[in-house]
Image (tube, grey):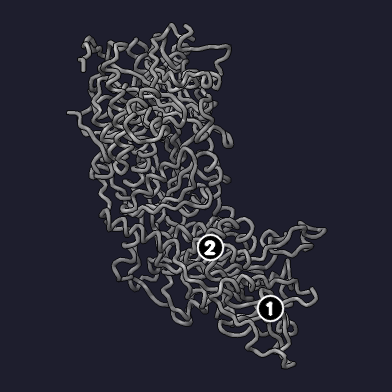
Amino acid sequence: MTTANEVVSGNGAKPGAVRPSAAEGYASDQEVRWCPGCGDYSILKQVETVLKEQGKPKEEIVFISGIGCSSRFPYYLDTYGMHSIHGRAPAIVSGLRAVRPELSVWMITGDGDALSIGGNHLIHLLRRNVDVNVLLFNNEIYGLTKGQYSPTSPEGAITKSTPMGSVDHPFNPLALCKGADATFIARAMDRDPKHMREVLLAADAHRGTSLIEIYQNCNVFNDGAFEVFTEKASKPFRTLFVEHGKPLVFANGTKGIKLDGMTPVIVDLGDGSTSLDDLWIHDQHDSFKASILVRLFDDQVQEGAMPRPFGVFYVAARASMETKLNAQVALAKQKKGPGDLDALLRGERTWTIQ
Amino acid sequence: METPIRTKTVEERRNVVILFAGDSGDGIQLTGSQFTDTSALFGNDVSTFPNFPAEIRAPQGTLAGVSGYQLHFGSVEIFTPGDQCDVLVVMNAAALKANLNKLKPGGTIIANSDGFDAKNLRLAGYIDKQEPLTDGTLTNYTVHAIDVTKMTRNALADTTLGMKEKDRCKNMFVLGFISWMYSRSLENSERFLEEKFGKKPEVLDANKKALLAGYNYGDTSETFTTRFEVKPAPLPKGTYRSITGNQGIALGLVAGAQKAGLDLFYGSYPITPASDILHELARHKNFGVKTFQAEDEIAAICSAIGASYGGALGITASSGPGIALKGEALGLAFMLELPLVVVNVQRGGPSTGLPTKTEQADLWQAIHGRNGEAPIPVLAASSPTDCFEMAYEAVRIAIEHMTPVILLSDGYIANGAEPWRFPQASDLQPITSPFATPKVEGDTEKFLPYLRDDNGVRPWAIPGMAGLQHRIGGIEKEDGTGNISYDPLNHEKMVRLRAEKVRKVVENVPPLDLSNGVDSGDLLILGWGSTYGAIKTAVNEMCAEGNCVGHVHLRYLYPFRKELGDIISRFKRVLIPEMNSGQLRQLIRAEYLVDAKGLNKIQGMPFTSAEIKAAAIEYLKQ
């Protein structure tokens, strides 16, 4: 029996399969309609760049999104794409991956889409480790509905729906993902495209759910939410770019972070009292340390605040749901033989009326 | 050993209804289904109705904990599990109290006397020293009190099993006794036990001993002077098996996917009474069936949509509360115009309602339960075997018309069983997937994902097909290209195009075929879903008595079949029996401006044919 999958990918010959030239790229013919100055443009650009660098055939790439400003993303790429419904992209991705594990699947979501209405689906996507690159655009606001607070807005945030300030405690998205046993956790920002590109490449190379939280500025409803991390003057002191195997250093090399037992502490590197060897050396495969790293989430106005980490926090190897599911199907076929429909209809016990 | 005096006579019966009842832990469902199997294998026509409490183990001995299994078997064609029973088998006092009203006057009660001790009588609510088995209140019935517990223990005296395990064999004693009473061999039951307990020789041995003890008790006890015989039914020639509605749906879905050459993806969240479909499908992975137990109902349907987007057949099933949660995603599937089958095994509502009881109250939900104008074909199965056919039909329509399809079943036919003359795979109607034509080298024309064929159906282009990349979504789309469009005229056009596509579905379905009785006359009884057997029995009886009554049973509830209006106009009166307050009736009145009358029962229990017949006769008098 020929399955739909074989119809298109089983015969090897792919009529019309053309790798796009550098000039053509992966952009679709649709006009991009985000607000001028939106951080989404930078993310789209980097994703296009990464796709081009990898050169995968367009038809083997699928972008699935939910609802929100960021979720318009699939329309702007000449790949397969679905702009689905609010919060449900992880479930759609799970079904797609289960039946088409050979495809390259990306999921585009926002802080409201992924962490509010779709929170349940996100944690289950992570525990199942469905092989997909999740780009979580976090702008700490509801943009498409014009400015209500989101599950990542800080307490006290004054928005249209919280004129006296938000009374809700915000999520720490990466701590949430770590708690759901994510196998790839990273953070990037719209204003550092070069770094974002590296993180995207690492995420795509990972087999399993790769979750990247991307700080994305909404210049209309929440302008400057991440200014302290992105502006030249404050960036070196407020951010911490982690790299596997390297010590945790920031503030242009003048400060580092060391673990005092389970507690991270900031140390001065200039006075000679601490050497680089004494610092916390980032090991992206260390689950316990990753659990501490995601907790570096201080409010930056606070005295002695820890810098906010960026980069790949954690990578673990674990088989995806669809790998195990398809292995079961293969095993069942091997053990019982391919399905015999007549035998199935007949069942175990029959009788005949003459 | 002294040979018992063989004074026993054998009487023939055309059809018999037995109701087995006991605590939900008494193994009643197993006893009933085993005797059903034996009767079906013997060649009787059968119909069953398992009826159990929502609680897995309600307090022992109470009315809330009573589980029942009603079996109707006969040497004639059988369409329902029977209005009232001839024989009531009760394992305790609560089972008697809960079911006595279902026993025909003069019927037989077989009671486990051990279940009528002081404690059981009190739990069942018999007060003031009432002892129904002995106090003369059951004089209108034939009562056989048997101490099943004691006799089972005696039969198992030699085994090393504990008392609790011995007592678990009580149901086999009862099965053995009933097998004797209806002149049935124990062979089939023994074979079943061997399959079930093959790995536990002690338990197997005990169950077989109890079974045989029950049989021998009937044979040797002088209390029982008569046994009965129900000859095979004159069913159409062929090979049969027994099937429940939920099995029928699962097999219909697999068969449809196989004939279409697609992998089947089933996303589902456990819910009564639909879970058995998931259990059945999970066993058939070698057919390329992938089952996914989702985190919730919404994820269940969305994962199925993702699978259909990938080129598999996405399916989800639930019951009313779960379908409510799937509403938004159903709208998405409608907008995407992808194949999707959504099964609703209805139960009593609203809200959590009556999870283990039956009802037909989700018809409006199926037809209207979405925002915007999102018509979806709605089908309904009328019997356990029809569940197979309609599930297959739902798959065919979903794929060939690129649309979500809702299939309605209910708790009554989902758990009920009947003989099924199963088809050959080669006899099943072929199903063709409308896959897009692959692009050839040099073809630079832009692919139009929403370019429709004569049936209004768009091409199914799936990831991996080179040159056909496109984007789809829930936002209104431009005709042809599928690009986002907010143009007012385009929106109206698209709403109409999508509705027209769904309307065309009934142009390609077989003619109305579930009718019986006359095709014009005084009264049309119009039904849908699981009321089929009760209506058919009532109409057959009325026609035999000289009434001019017809029966049309709808399997396509949205859109309506074109010929339905003509049929309705040929009758003077229309009666619509439904297990709801009149949902089909309102649709029929609105569509055909006919003064249809309703017969409505909302008790979590199916109609009896007598109820339908009485209402029809009353209506004819008016």
In the rendering, which numbered label is found on residue A260? 1
| Depth check, front residue: B315 or A290 | A290
| Depth check, front residue: B41 or B416 | B41
Q: Secondary structure at mark 1?
A: strand
Identify the residue at horizontal 39%, vertical 54% (top origin): B290
Indicate the amino acid at tag 2.
Leu
- Please determine whether, in this image, residue A326 is positioned above or below residue B521: below
Left or right of B219 on screen, residue B21: right
Percent of width and height locating residue A109: 58, 64
Identify the residue at horizontal 27%, vertical 53% (top origin): A336
Mark 1: few, some, or many residues within 10 Å (few <14, many ≥20)? few
Which picture quadrant has residue A230? bottom right
Farthest-out residue, left: A354
Indicate the amino acid at tag 1.
Asp
The chain letter for the residue carrying disc 2 is A
Q: Nearer the observer, disc 2 or disc 1?
A: 1
Is any part of residue B154 visible from this angle?
yes
Percent of width and height locating residue B268: 47, 48
Label 2 sits on residue: A126
Percent of width and height locating residue B565: 43, 28
Is any part of residue B493 visible from this angle?
no
